[in-house]
Image (cartoon, grey):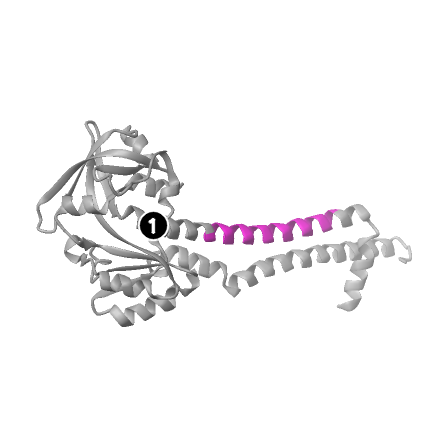
C-alpha cells in the first residue's frame, strides 16, 4: 500500500493540469460537505429560535388534559401563588399567561377559522418577539380592550388594514356562543406564513369577558436563561405540580424540530459525511494509480523502459 501511495503521489505531478483538476474537485467536495453541514445546522437552529421566540417558549404549563384536548373545560384558574413560585426559580427570566381558543373571525365579506390568543401585553413582550414583528400600526396596550392584532397573510386574505372592524366568535365554557367586535390596531409579520395566517391577538381581559371565563387561562409560557435547562426544569416542575398541571419543554411541543436537530448532530450523520468525503479522496487517488499503471503497461508493451 505504501508503495502504491508513493507511486501515486509521484505520478500526480507528472501532469500538472490533471493534478490541478483533481485537487480542485477534492477541495470543492470537502467545501461542499462542510457548507451543507453548516447550512443545515444553522437552518434548524433558526427554525427552533423562531418557534420558541414567536410563540412556544422554552417551557409551557397547561391544565390537566389540555394538551390532548384543548378546550375551555380543561383550562385552569389564574394561580398567583404558582406564578410567584415559578418566578423564584433561578433559571426563569420571564413568564406570561395566555388564553388560546379556536374561533371564527368575520368581516363584511370574509370569514375564517383562526386561533385567538389572549395576552397580557406587557408580559408578552418579555416572552415573545411578536411586538417586534409589527409592520403596520402598533402593538396592543393595556387600555385597548377592543383592539386586535392580525397577521400580514390574514390581512391580505381578508383585505384588512389598520382601523378596520372585525367580529370574533368562539364557544364559551358553558357551551354558549360568545362574540365581540374588535378593531385592527396592528398587523404583524413573523416570517412564518402559516402562523401569520392562522393567529390573532387580543387582550386577555377582553377575551375572558367574551368567553365568560373570569380569571381563567389556558397556558403559562416560560423563558429560561438557557434553553439547555428546559428538560431538567420541566422534569422538576412536573414532580412538584404534576398532580394539577402538565408541564412540557419545547422538545415535546416541537417534536419535528427536536428530532431534526438530534439527527443532524448525531455521530452517525457525521460519519456518513466523512465517509463520502473520504470516498471521494480515495477515488481520486485510485484514478491516478490506474492511470499510472495503464501508462506503464503501454510503455512496456511499446518496448520503452519506464523511469
Crowding near pointer 1: few (<14 within 10 Å), some, many (20+)? Answer: some
Quadrant hosting residue 306: bottom right
Measured as percent of width and height from the top left, residue 127 is found at 35, 52
Q: Residue at x 20, y 30 (%)?
A: 107
What span is in magenta? 21-45
Indicate whether residue 155 is drawn in magenta.
Answer: no
Q: Residue at x 46, y 60 (%)?
A: 263
Main secondary structure type of the part rendered in magenta: helix
- Check the image and report above or below for 76 versus 109: below
Measured as percent of width and height from the top left, residue 224 is found at 39, 60
Quadrant hosting residue 197: top left
Quadrant placement of the C terminus: bottom right
Quadrant placement of the N terminus: bottom right
Which of these two is toward me, 49 or 269?
49
Q: Residue at x 76, y 58 (%)?
A: 289
Q: Which type of secondary structure does the marked residue at label 1 adopt?
A: helix
Quadrant hosting residue 290: bottom right
Measured as percent of width and height from the top left, residue 282 is found at 68, 59
Of all residues, the one furthest to the front in this rendering is 143
Query: Is 62 left, or right, of 273 in this rendering?
Result: left
Query: Is 95 left, or right, of 41 in this rendering?
Result: left
- Check the image and report above or below for 188 versus 14: above
Question: For mark 1, what is the residue?
Answer: 55
Which of these two is toward me, 165 or 90?
90
Measured as percent of width and height from the top left, residue 27 is found at 68, 51
Of all residues, the one furthest to the bottom in this rendering is 239
Q: Residue at x 12, y 51 (%)?
A: 173
Which of these two is toward me, 301 or 285?
285
Query: Is 251 left, or right, of 110 in this rendering?
Result: right
Indicate whether residue 25 is drawn in magenta.
Answer: yes
Amino acid at each position: 500500500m505504501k508503495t502504491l501511495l508513493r507511486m501515486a503521489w509521484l505520478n500526480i505531478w507528472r501532469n500538472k493540469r490533471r493534478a490541478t483538476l483533481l485537487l480542485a474537485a477534492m477541495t470543492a467536495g470537502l467545501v461542499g460537505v462542510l457548507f451543507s453541514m453548516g447550512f443545515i445546522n444553522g437552518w434548524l437552529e433558526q427554525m427552533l429560535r423562531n418557534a420558541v421566540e414567536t410563540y412556544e417558549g422554552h417551557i409551557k404549563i397547561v391544565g390537566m388534559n389540555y394538551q390532548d384536548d384543548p378546550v375551555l373545560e380543561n383550562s385552569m384558574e389564574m394561580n398567583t401563588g404558582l406564578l410567584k413560585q415559578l418566578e423564584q426559580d433561578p433559571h426563569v427570566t420571564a413568564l406570561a399567561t395566555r388564553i388560546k381558543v379556536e374561533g371564527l373571525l368575520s368581516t363584511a365579506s370574509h370569514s375564517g377559522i383562526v386561533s385567538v390568543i389572549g395576552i397580557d401585553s406587557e408580559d408578552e413582550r418579555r416572552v415573545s418577539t411578536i411586538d417586534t414583528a409589527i409592520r403596520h400600526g402598533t402593538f396592543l396596550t393595556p387600555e385597548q380592550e377592543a383592539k386586535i392584532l392580525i397577521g400580514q397573510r390574514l390581512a391580505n386574505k381578508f383585505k384588512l388594514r389598520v382601523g378596520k372592524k372585525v367580529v370574533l366568535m368562539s364557544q364559551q365554557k358553558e357551551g354558549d356562543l360568545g362574540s365581540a367586535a374588535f378593531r385592527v390596531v396592528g398587523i404583524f409579520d413573523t416570517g412564518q406564513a402559516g402562523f401569520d395566517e392562522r393567529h390573532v391577538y387580543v387582550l386577555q381581559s377582553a377575551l375572558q369577558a367574551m368567553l365568560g371565563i373570569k380569571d381563567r387561562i389556558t397556558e403559562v409560557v416560560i423563558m429560561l436563561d438557557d434553553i439547555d435547562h428546559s428538560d431538567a426544569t420541566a422534569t422538576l416542575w412536573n414532580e412538584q405540580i404534576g398532580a394539577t398541571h402538565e408541564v412540557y419543554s419545547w422538545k415535546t411541543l416541537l417534536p419535528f424540530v427536536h428530532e431534526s436537530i438530534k439527527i443532524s448532530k448525531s455521530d452517525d450523520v457525521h460519519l456518513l459525511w466523512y465517509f463520502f468525503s473520504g470516498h471521494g479522496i480515495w477515488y481520486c487517488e485510485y484514478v491516478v494509480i490506474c492511470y499510472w499503471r495503464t501508462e506503464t503497461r503501454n510503455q512496456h508493451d511499446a518496448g520503452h523502459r519506464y523511469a
